[in-house]
Image (cartoon, rainbow, N blue to C red):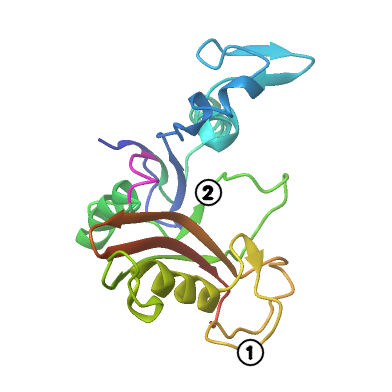
Amino acid sequence: KNVIGRIRGNGGGLNLLLLGHLDVAAAGFSPPYAELWTHNPLEPEVEAGWLYGWGAGNMKSGDAAMISAAKAVLDSGLPLEGDLTVACVMGETYGSMGTLRLLEFIESGDLRADVAIIPERTQLDVVTITVGNAKARIEVEGKMRFRANGAHSPIDLMTKLLNALGPSYRLNPTLEGWLTFRPHPELPGYPQIVVEKIESYGDIRAIDFWIRFVPGQ
């Protein structure tokens, strides 16, 4: 359920889209993260100029900023040449389903956008380039038997797969191997491989992982 607001222009200029997501990560309430809160995350509180609360950094502060900007434009009474659209979408952590739904409106002509600003966390920098994001799942099948030959064990097969993927949460240190890339000067520390989880059932071992890749990779 996306929430979209629009201030219409007279059609003589570019259309600006301010885009943020409404969902938040749930990990902040599970150990060991829950013990790290210094304030009640469900009761927002301002202390020494900082706002503490669930999702304040990702990205409710950004949503508040773009809504406030649109309200300032509206309160000014100045006419706009292009449309100003504020879109708060859902499902950022579920395949960006809200953004995909928003794109359907744009493609159908119900919504116009020539330029977009996304107020994600960037240390207050203006960023014109970003990493890509792909999620993959690989399953390996072996024979989980007592004293089974190691060559056929799904655990050993998964170990070989993990070694081939390389270190989790780290930059691939070379230009060699299966994940080849050319470093981008504006994206230090990328690409990254992040192993999300490993599952086991019967003779099957499965791994879910993310690849944050650089442009041109």
Q: In which quarter of the image is the N terminus?
A: top left
Residue type beneath disc 2: Ile
**93 drawn magenta:** yes
- Name the residue: 39% across, 60% down: 208
Q: Which of 209 and 154 is in front in this view?
A: 154
What secondary structure is marked by label 2?
A: loop
Three-letter amino acid code of the residue under disc 1? Glu
**Residue 112: in magenta span:** no
Query: Left or right: 193 with respect to 148?
Result: right
Q: Residue 79 carries which label?
A: none
Residue 44 at x, y = what percent?
57, 13
- Residue at 56% over, 22% down: 34
Q: Quickly name the residue at label 1.
A: 176
Q: In this view, does 155 lie to the left or right of 58?
A: left
> Is 18 or 139 nearer to us in this picture?
139
Q: Nearer the viewer, residue 43 or 99?
A: 43
